[in-house]
Amino acid sequence: MIYNPISVSELNKYIKSKFEEDEYFDNVLVEGEISNCKHHYTGHIYFTLKDDKALIKSIMFKTYTTHLDFELQDGMKVIILGSVSVFERDGTYQLYAKAVKQLGKMGDLRAAFEQLKEKLEKEGLFNAEHKKPIPKFPRTIGVLTSNTGSVIRDIINVSTRRNPNVYIKLLPVPVQGEGAAVKIAEGIDFMNKKNLADVLIIARGGGSLEDLWPFNEEIVARAIYNSEIPVISAVGHETDFTISDFVADLRAPTPSAAAELAVPDIVLVENNLNKYQIRNKQALIKKIKLMRLQYEKCMASRAFTNPLQKVNERYMQIDSIVKELNYNIGQKMQQEKAKAQSIILKIDALSPLKTLTRGYSIALKDGKIVKSVSQLYKGDEIQIRMQDGQTNAKII
């Protein structure tokens, strides 16, 4: 028996690839208690996240620790947004934290968030097949956000820089506080009924879970889902996730990024068009050269230099065929003539007339040949045919 073992590193690499293939592990929200927390001199934080039944090794890289507004400590109850993958060297899977929120007064909101997320996910509001494509060259960008603050200024600056010809239509809505969710949903419906934009951006800056809560309410989620206009959700910072992000046709990490996603860079578009124009021109020149070569080759062929040659060759073939047919017909006629002469000679040799030339005669009674004496009676008149004539006779 032949075995084909793999190395340990190959096995760990394969297991890691399986984790990376599962989109569920890209962004998971995990609740638990911090233990064995160690702040490394590199800025990374190593810790264990546990509950009463299990634990998982975790790490938060320096890139994300700078966004923390509190210090991670043992015994702290938290909710972590992160991804799960395999550390190949040790063959262990661990949680890679991107954002951490303390539990406390936010516990009820987080539970409500998870409950609504699960409900809408089961209804299919997050499914990819319901996502509408973002127009490549929109003329009008509808923005639902506060009319004050840096969000709308950032969107306008980025949009006009990328394409000065694009129109920005701002529909001011409250982005936090009581009643904000209703106003946001009404704004989405209004933009759709009036068909005021090619794409909508729902945006606000960063904040706590309470500040972002209007974008986690069901009324806003369903308004986004029912929107005929494609919707880009740009709520909070890159590490913030809301229900609106999951329902929207596209999520942007920041409002400025939403403007970049919605508005194409006109300079880049023009450069691409110029490249395509040059490529098309070169391709056309190459095609013309190729067609000219084909034309010259075609005109140099015998079909054009001596068009009757082929016809004459066919005439010669026909003459040859006719000559051969005439010869074959003559041969056949001679053969058939020889056969006919042979048959005639045979027939002539068997003819009764031929017998008469040798001195024989034929007796006929009533026009019929007499073959036996018993056919004749006394007094019968008969005819006798000889070589040179016929005479009558009477039986006596």
Image (spheres, rainbow, N blue to C red):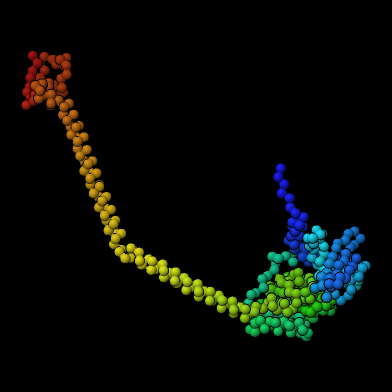
Residue 1 lies, in percent from the top left, at 71, 42
Please provide percent x and percent y for residue 129. 69, 65
**The residue positioned farthest toward the right in the image shown:** 75
**Residue located at (89% from left, 68% from top):** 38
Spot occupied by residue 19 in the image (x, y as percentages of width and height): 76, 60
On screen, residue 265 above or below 328: below
Q: Which quadrant is home to the C terminus?
A: top left
140 on left or right of 340: right
Residue 337 vertical placement versus 388 (above, below): below
Front one among 53 and 40: 40
Q: Name the spot of residue 316 as percent of width and height, x first.
A: 26, 55
Could one spot residue 272 in this view of the protein? yes
Q: Quadrant of residue 308?
A: bottom left
Residue ID at (12%, 26%): 354
Q: Which is nearer the eye, 132 or 68?
A: 68
Horizontal side, residue 368 vs residue 197: left or right? left
Residue 230 image-quadrant placement:
bottom right
Give residue 158's quadrant in the image.
bottom right
Left or right, residue 34 beside residue 96 = right
Which of 47 and 22 lies nearest the eye of the viewer? 47
Residue 39 vs residue 142, the one in the foreground: 39
Residue at 86% from the left image edge and 67% from the top image edge:
46
Residue 193 seen in the current view: no
Q: Residue at x 47, y 74 (%)?
A: 285
